[in-house]
Structures are given as C-alpha cells and as structure tokens.
Amino acid sequence: MTETLVHAYVPLLVWSGLGLLLFRFLPDGLPRLLGRGLYWVGIPLEVLALARQTHFARNIGIAPIVTIAALLGGLGLAWLSLQSLRRVSQPASATDAPSIWEDRSRQGSFLLSSTLGNTGFVGLAIAPALVSDPYVSWIVFYSITHNIIGTYGIGVVLSSYFGRSSESNRWWMQLRDVLTVPSLWAFALGYATQSVVLPDRVEDSLHASIWVVIPIALLLMGMRLSQLNGWKSLKLAIVPAILKVIILPAGVGLATRLLQLPAEPSLALVLMSGMPTAFAGLILAEEYELDRETIASSIVLTTGLLLLTIPLWLLLWGQPLPSR
C-alpha cells in the first residue's frame, strides 16, 4: 500500500509544487485562464476519452446507487454543518463585522469541498490496488457516476447558485448552466461513439490528453496554494475536511453493513467515498467566481488526512490483499 500511495502522490507533489514555486513569476490572471481552459476544453477531452473506453453495461449494480446516495447524504451533512457555523458565528451586535460564513461564494465553496471527491486522479490511482480484480469495476463506476452526477451535475448547480447574488438568481439559470456543461456533452458523445473506430492518431491523442490535463490541474492547485495565508486559511477547511474524508466514508461503510455487502465491495465504496476534495471544485470556483481559499485549503487537509484514513478503512472493512 505504501508503494501505491507514493506512486499516486509523486506527481501530485511535483506538479503542485512547481505551480507553488512559479506563481510569483507568472501573471496574476493565469490561474483563472487555466481554470476556464480546463473547464471548457481539458476536462471534456478527458471525459470523452474515458467514456469511449469504459464498458458501462458490465458495471451496472449497486455502486451507482450508493454513489448517488453518498453525494446526497454528503450534501445534506454539509448544508446542516454550514447552517450551524452560520448560527454560532453570528456577530454579538449590529456594529460587529458580519460572519465570514455569510459570504455566498464561501458558502458555495464549503458545500463543494464537503461533497465532491477526487475519485478520478487520486481515487483511480489508489483504490484499485486495494481490492481484488472482480471489484475494480465498482471503483470505476463509482468514479464515473460521481463525476457525471456529482461534479458536473450537483457541483455545477451549487456553483451557479452561489456564484450569483440571491437577487439575480433564477431557477432556469441553474438548469441552463447544467445543460451547457461541456463535460456532460463530451460524456454523451463518447458513449454514443464507442462503436465508432477513430483513426489511430485521433484515438492516441484523446488518451494522451488525460496526461496533459492532470498536470495542468495540479499546477493550478499549486498556484492557488501559494495564495493561502497559513492557519488563517486552513481553519476554514477543518469542517469540510472532516465531513469529506471521515464522516461520509464512515456513513457509507455503515450503510454497506446494513445492506450486508461482502467485505471487498464495501471497502471499494468506502475508499472512493473518502477520497480528498476534488480538484474539479477549484476549476468550478474559477469558472463561477467562488471562494478559492476554502477549496484549496480543503484539498490540502483532505489529501493529508487520506494517508491516515486509508489504513483505518482497511482495518474496519478490508481483508488481507489477495495475491496477484
């Protein structure tokens, strides 16, 4: 397991570290440009490539149901936690400064940080090595369902809603934003063209795009990390981090026990639900002008906590790894 974690974390540390070091020498507007480029071009290319090569009919089962339940459950817990924070941080008098949690962009980032997980880059890099081959399909389908329903469904709705003032918000704006998400159209196109044979050069380019998108996303994360103000920034993400990598996967694990699932599929679902806050949340924050500080801080805390929680989930829901 240690070797697997190291293999997954080396590119994360290298590319985000490079972004952290280079940001002071780059134009201030570059992070937003990168974020918008990933949203409109990079991520759709990655989704298109994955949709073309994934055989969904083989993976249908309880995994997507648990994924959607985890997303909705995580969002509900995050909403209740946010309302509690707003109540306890209310100013003592009208002359005091308003609570930091009254800012709509920060509220949206709190919900995204608590709900959306990095099931793609980190999840698919780590979890398959911790379960036997027959259950890897559960992990893949969890990742796909989470990204389509969660990141580019629920995530876009939240970003669209909290990225606008309450006075200018209309329900059709959120519907419009979801219907125009480029990654959803890329998924539909990829799924519809699975049987279409593309020229080798085109197919190879699609697959290669994945290994370009990931470094750019990590560079963006490093640039935003360079703008954090130490503990002042990190404390904003304590609650989202606990919800994302401890409470939510524990709840999923208890649910799998109630459903009487075998140990390995239970472990697969627990691992994926406990992945750190998604890089895609930062991309959505760039596109919809949400608070980047909260999401970047949550990525840092949840990524660090992952090293501690994976051994815990293996102890509670895992079995000795089968020989390969």
Image: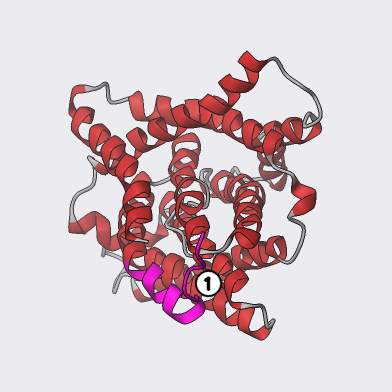
| In the depicted structure, whether residue 249 falls above or below residue 6 | below
**Residue 282 percent coordinates (x, y):** 43, 43
**Is residue 313 something that shows in the picture?**
yes
Q: Along the horizontal axis of the image, is 72 left or right of 96?
A: right
Q: The N terminus appears in which quarter of the rendering?
A: bottom left
Between 162 and 65, the residue placed more toward the observer is: 65
**Is residue 116 something that shows in the picture?**
no
Seen at 49% across and 53% down, the residue is 123
Seen at 53% across and 61% down, the residue is 272
Question: Residue furthest toward the front?
Answer: 323
**Residue 276 percent coordinates (x, y):** 42, 57
Seen at 25% across and 54% down, the residue is 233
**Residue 47 percent coordinates (x, y):** 62, 35
Q: Toward which corner of the image does residue 183 lie, by quadrant?
A: top right
**Residue 321 magenta:** yes
| In the depicted structure, whether residue 249 falls above or below residue 13 | below
Residue range in magenta is 308-324
Q: Along the horizontal axis of the image, is 26 left or right of 274?
A: left
Between 162 and 282, the residue placed more toward the observer is: 282
- Using a 10 Å C-alpha cutoff, classify the residue at mark 1 as few (fewer than 14 neighbours), some (14 to 19) or many (20 or more): some
**Residue 197 magenta:** no
Q: Along the horizontal axis of the image, is 174 left or right of 245?
A: right
**Residue 79 percent coordinates (x, y):** 52, 67
Q: Amino acid at mark 1?
A: Leu
| In the depicted structure, whether residue 324 falls above or below residue 105 | below
- Residue bearing the label numbered 1: 77
Seen at 53% across and 72% down, the residue is 77
- Local SS, label 1: helix
| In the depicted structure, whether residue 289 falls above or below residue 155 | above
